[in-house]
Amino acid sequence: MKEWENNPGFGPGQIRNQLRRQKITISTKSVRKLMQANGYKVSKKKVKKEDQRFESSRPLELAQMDILEFYVNKLKVYIILLLDDYSRFILDWNLLEQTSMDEVIKVVLDAVSRYGKTEEVLTDRGFVFYSWHGINRFEKYLEMT
C-alpha cells in the first residue's frame, strides 16, 4: 500500500480517491480491508448525541405553535397550529392566504377562551413569533396573559 505509506494520515476513502486519480478502481471497503491487514486501526465512530427530548407532564403545561405553508392548486396557503404538547390535541388552528401577527394572536386567544391558559408556548422563532430587535406584539401579548 504505497499510497498509504506516502499519506499515513489518510483513511480508506482518501486512499481510494488517490488510487482513482491513478486510474485504479477499487472500493473503499476493499481499501479498508487491505489497510487493516497492514496494521490500520479503524477509528471508532463518533457517538451521535441523542436529540434533546422534552415532554410536558400534564395538559396545558406546554403548547407548541407553528405555521405550515403549502399549495392548494396554485394558491399558497398557511395553516397556523397550536398544539398541546401533553395530549397532542390541536387547541386551535386557522387556514389563511397570508400570515400576520394578528392571526397568530387570534389563534392563541381562541384556544385560551376555549380550554384555558397554557403555561408556556414553544415556537420556532419564525418572524411572526419572534423579533431580533426588541419585543414584538406577540411576545408582549404572551407576557401580559
Image (spheres, rainbow, N blue to C red):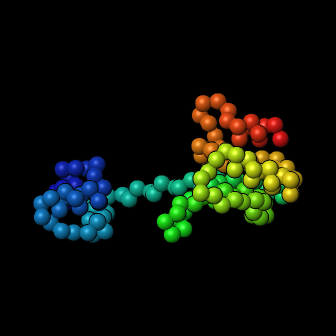
Which one is in front, 120 or 107?
Answer: 107
- Residue 25 picture location, percent across and down: 18, 68
Quadrant in the picture for residue 84 = bottom right
How many marks the image carries: the answer is 0
Quadrant in the picture for residue 139 = top right
**Res 108 seen here:** yes
- Residue 7 picture location, percent across and down: 22, 50
Which one is in front, 44 or 58?
Answer: 58
| Residue at left offset 45%, top offset 57% | 45
Q: In which quarter of the image is the C terminus?
A: top right
| Residue at left offset 85%, top offset 49% | 117
| Residue at left offset 31%, top offset 68% | 29
On screen, residue 23 versus residue 103, left or right, reads left
Which one is in front, 84 or 105?
Answer: 105
On screen, residue 41 versus residue 94, left or right, reads left
Q: In which quarter of the image is the N terminus?
A: bottom left
Which one is in front, 109 or 12?
Answer: 109
- Residue 74 picture location, percent across and down: 49, 65
Q: Is residue 121 above or below residue 86?
A: above
Q: Is residue 64 above or below residue 20?
A: above
- Residue 67 picture location, percent across and down: 62, 55
| Residue at left offset 28%, top offset 48% | 9
**Res 54 seen here:** no
